[in-house]
Image: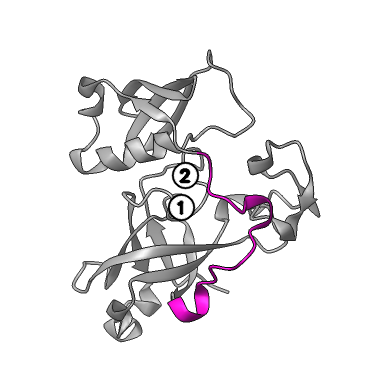
Amino acid sequence: MEPVAHIRTDFASKFGVPRQAGLVEQLRAAVVLEPPYRTPEILRGIEGFSHLWLIWEFSENRDRGWSPTVRPPRLGGNRRLGVFATRSPFRPNPIGLSCVRLEGVEWDAPDGPVLHVSGADMVDGTPVLDIKPYIPYADCRPEAAGGFAGSAPEAGLAVECPQPLLERAPEDKRAALLGVLAQDPRPPYQDDPGRAYGFGFAGMEVRFTVRDRVVTVTDIRPPES
């Protein structure tokens, strides 16, 4: 299979990316078609759907192998489950699946028609293998059992970010940044209040600590060269 598109997001690396699509609706991304598919005809009718399925490749894991069992972060990394009972990125075929909201289509973009979406959970540049419409009557199953992930994650953390620091981030990215921080980007099994964390977002390096379920932003600056 060859990618039909790639995605532009604000995440330079995996750290900080929400653990599931749709957890931070303020996140905006663009799905840019690859040259063979940059034609309006290929997207004809797509505006009639509010949500899309993106099928994509865990491209950063190509050479890292896989195991029949994994330790899901949701279970604290202390219990092993079969890889097919989880959404681990380390799979026999490293394929991801995300449901995103279609915010609009930019038909006359310089690189062909571009899909603008929200709620994506991907690193910048991730290859997209296919795009399919989300169909509510077929894709929504309210009665479905969710296994070990049957309930939504614990309520988000409080975020404290001094206004002068927040103003260093682009204005249209601030709500998304605060939403990402509230989701607690740390691995679930790390809870060291003395540790400083950092990740790249929207061309900035964001530094923070976490204590007593409060995220404190300590710095927002251009990435170090």
Image position of 63 with respect to 201: above or below: below
Pick whichever, 62 or 18, lies toward us: 18
Q: Which quarter shows the N terminus?
A: bottom right
Q: Residue at x 22, y 37 (%)?
A: 170
Residue 195 in view? yes
The answer to the question of whether label 1 and label 2 lie on touching residues, with beta carbons closer than 8 A, is yes
Counting from the top left corner in percent of width and height, residue 90 is at 68, 52
* Mark with earlier residue (1, 2): 2
**Element type at marker 2?**
loop
The quadrant in which residue 35 appears is bottom left
Magenta stretch mostly in which secondary structure? loop
Quarter of the picture containing the C terminus is: top left
Measured in 3D between alpha carbons, the distance from the residue under mark 1 to the one under mark 2, in whole angstroms, is 6 Å
Which residue was labeled with disc 1?
A: 121
| Membership of 153 in magenta stretch | yes
The segment highlighted magenta reads 136-154
